[in-house]
Image: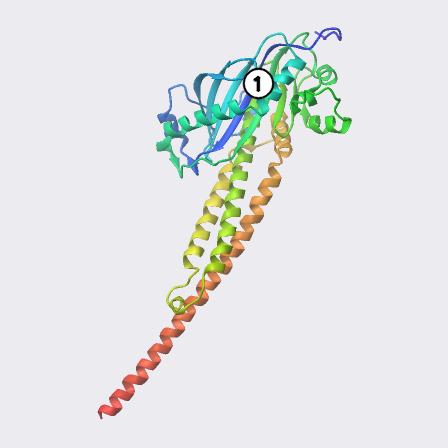
Amino acid sequence: MSVSTELPLLFEQAHILCYRTFDIAEEIDLERARKALSEDSRRLKLSRENSQYIQLPNPPVAYELGRKALAMRGGPVTVDATARLFDHGAASIILRVPVTPGTTWERLTDVADELYDSQALEDLARELVEGVRRTIATAVQGPHLWDQSESYTVIFAERIQGNPTAEELFQRADIARLLLGEVGTLDLAPREREAVTQVRFSYTVNDLVVVDWNSAFVYEPSGSRDIPDLLEIANAQLLEFRYYDERLDKHIARIHDEVQARKRGWLTLFRSPYRDLARETLGTLVDLNEFVERVENSLKIIGDFYLAKVYEGAVRRMRIPAWQGSVTRKQQLLAQTYGLLKGEVDIDRSHILEVMIVALIILEIVLAFGRVFQH
């Protein structure tokens, strides 16, 4: 059924998925976590045709947190809360905000704008993730809560009045303004509008996905949640690369400070001042290699089909390759630094051996003179 241009774009069935993703551990044992959770916990499984070509070697675990009250300008709204756990240490809080049937595009833009920067939503998500941390405490290694998080919002529409096609919806609806939460009266510049909506996909004439760097619009009459799930996985990967990028920055800065602060003295003849630092740097490199492997293996693509294209488009739009490249460069720098530190340790060790050899020679001379004098 084709939409009439006279009909307004009213949402008949839709909701807004608000993701807040936190780094809570170095690693999460998902099977142990499942045992600590409620019986309705479940592993992520994609359902669309050809989804078998996207492999999730260790699928994240999700469980329901119940209904919560979210404070909004128009009064409190009841939202469904879900937690999803990833083996690489991330925990995602998903708040499902209902969209009242009959909501206009302009009204939805107002709601989205409020949710993008909602402090009440941030506070609720942090409160919920603290509860998650307590619940799965026995299943985590290296527990912590990074002070930063990643946010992402998906406007998910299943039915729009008149059942517009993807092309009709894209032409008529101001998707760029919705994704930006731009509620002003001024029109967006054409280049800005194109920049926001350039990453878009359609599998049939009746569905549409538009991915921006911190929000997405998904028009999916089938109701499949596969695309929001893939966007969540990409968001969690982004968080992890940002976390380790900061961790590497701190470690490299600390190496510089400690090398500058350490002074050589006679005690360094017996113990290198860089031995502990070199050992710690090696440990960081080993942890980092394991982390990169876990994150990169959290999703594997086999084949060039629709879901793979959406995921790869989201990865580019979220600038994940740039963060991954930054981590890789700092990883290489840290490896070079470890090589220099190890070189210093080896030099100090050779100095110790030289001192011992000289000491033994002197001892032999003294003993020889002693025997001569005795005779």
Give percent across and percent down for residue 305. 63, 27
Q: Residue furthest left?
A: 374
The residue drawn where x is 55% and y is 51% is 332
Numbered circles on residues, count = 1
Is residue 11 in view? yes
The residue drawn where x is 64% and y is 30% is 313
- Could you tell me which quadrant the N terminus lies in? top right
Is residue 50 in view? no
Q: Residue furthest right?
A: 190
Residue type at tag 1:
Ile
Left or right of 184, for residue 115: left
- Could you tell me which quadrant the C terminus lies in? bottom left
Left or right of 30, for residue 215: right
Q: Nearer the viewer, residue 338 or 68?
A: 68
Chosen colour scheme: rainbow
**Against 65, is 321 above or below?**
below
Q: Splitting the image into 4 quarters, where does residue 173 fall?
A: top right
Q: Residue furthest bottom?
A: 375
Give percent across and percent down for residue 342. 46, 60
The residue drawn where x is 70% and y is 8% is 8
The residue drawn where x is 67% and y is 9% is 163
**Against 153, is 14 above or below?**
above
Tell me the residue that label 1 is attached to. Answer: 16
Q: Splitting the image into 4 quarters, where does residue 185 fall?
A: top right
Q: Splitting the image into 4 quarters, where does residue 106 fall?
A: top right
Left or right of 80, for residue 269: left
Element at badge 1? strand
Give percent across and percent down for residue 244. 51, 42
Give percent across and percent down for residue 238. 56, 35
